[in-house]
Image (spheres, helix red, strand yellow):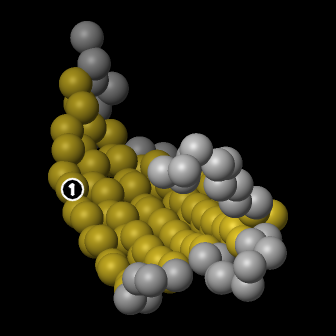
Amino acid sequence: MTPSGEGNFQFWTTRWEFQYARFNLGLRPIDDLDVALSAIVRRLHYDALDQDPTGGDDSIAYESTSVSTSVQAIYALSHRFSVGVNGILEVHRREGTGEDPGTRTLPRFGLFTGFWF
């Protein structure tokens, strides 16, 4: 509502797309070693188009892409104890109306042990 009590309407036409893909691969190069590889890709694209009849343009656009890759290896030292390592690399890219486009990379690494009783 405007201060005079009249309605103020804003009409938008929106469109969005989401894409997702995943690839997993398990390997056993030797009896006691399990290796897993994984890749995930996500993409989002969003548009909101202002349908303002007065000619103003408040349109919004946003796009992001994320790619994650990982590898994990587990080595069984016995039937009750194992050790492992994993590594993950993620890359994110974002771009939108009124924002500076940016990319960031997130590397991660881990070591772990497993006990079974």
Is residue 18 shown to the viewer in this render? no
Is residue 110 shown to the viewer in this render? yes
Q: Is residue 43 left or right of residue 49?
A: left
Q: Position of residue 64 (x, y in %)?
A: 55, 73
Residues 19 and 96: in front is 96
Residues 58 and 110: in front is 58
Residue at numbered disc 1: 110
20 shown above or below 79:
below
Residues 59 and 109: in front is 59
Q: Residues within 10 Å of mark 1 (few under 14, many from 20)?
A: few
Q: Is residue 68 left or right of residue 58?
A: left
Identify the residue at image location x=25%, y=64%: 108
Is the C terminus in the top left, top right, bottom left or bottom right quadrant?
top left
Q: Position of residue 26 (x, y in %)?
A: 59, 53
Residues 72 and 98: in front is 98
* Rendered image quadrant of residue 32: top left
18 shown above or below 59:
above
Q: Position of residue 29 (x, y in %)?
A: 52, 60
* Rendered image quadrant of residue 48: bottom right
Element at label 1: strand
Identify the residue at image location x=19%, y=38%: 113
Identify the residue at image location x=53%, y=61%: 37
Amino acid type at mark 1: Gly
Identify the residue at image location x=33%, y=47%: 75
Q: Is residue 92 left or right of residue 83?
A: right
